[in-house]
Image (spheres, rainbow, N blue to C red):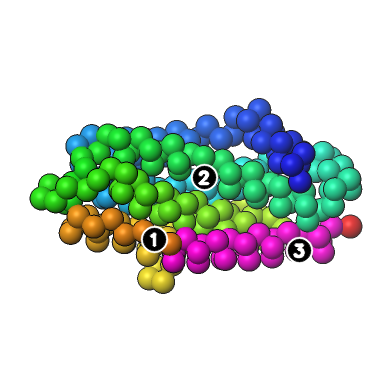
Amino acid sequence: MTALLRYQADLLARSQRWLPPLILYVAFLGIGVQSGQPVLDSLGYTAAGLLPVAAWLVRICVTGEPDAARACVAAARGPARAHLACLLTALLASVTLGVVATLVVTLISDPASNGHRVHVAPLRAGAAGLPATLTCALLGAAVGALTSRPLLRSTGRAVPAMLLGALFAVVLTGSPAQAAVHGLVTGSQTGRAPLPLLPLAGAVLLTAAAFAAAARLTDRRSP
């Protein structure tokens, strides 16, 4: 699996198809996160914005390999393992981007609650923001896995489904991503920085199930 991950990471880096989602995320943060804003609010914004980016990166990894090369890799290592490597590569790229963004936003934001009434230790804020960011990265990857091939092969269906899935994952009550982001925003009102460990655990389970379903379906649909 390590060799497959290196292969997929090299494909992603060389394709430069990661540039549009990266630019979109940087622009999103540049508009919504300003130096001196309350740190927990900014971290919630940072986490929420990562979810559709993670879904987009999954689509890039799943569809970026030429069909002939994909068939060769699937024949050598198995269709399920080859597809799982695409999904994991996108997830790792999303997590890396999220960790960097969380660190930068924590450093430039005001270590205070909403209204600047209560001090919020930057280390504590970062420790709360990182699990929220990971939760959104995981849920985004799950959305991407369930709205890309082999489940949805048509671009006309897959892209709208991906966008709607990302939106629902952020706003629907009960979603781990919504719970994690809401916890940060609510915590900013009081100056408390909650650790969203339960949403993170839920995101891990949902993403593992989505990845397993996509890999199994890939295996069944391969000749």
**In the depicted view, which residue is nearer to us: 12 or 129?**
129
Q: Closer to the N terminus: mark 2 or mark 3?
A: 2
Residue 205 picture location, percent across and down: 57, 66
Image quadrant where residue 121 sits: top left
Q: Amino acid at mark 1?
A: Pro
> SS for tag 3?
helix
Q: Residue furthest bottom?
A: 174
Spatial separation of the CA atoms under disc 1 and disc 3 = 30 Å
Kindly report which numbered mark, 2 or 3, lies closer to the viewer in this rendering: 2
> SS for tag 2?
helix
The overriding secondary structure of the stretch rendered in magenta is helix
Confirm whether the magenta stretch covers residue 161: no
Residue at image coords 39%, 61%: 196
> SS for tag 1?
loop
Circle 2 is placed at which residue position? 95
Can you tell which mark lies on residue 216? 3
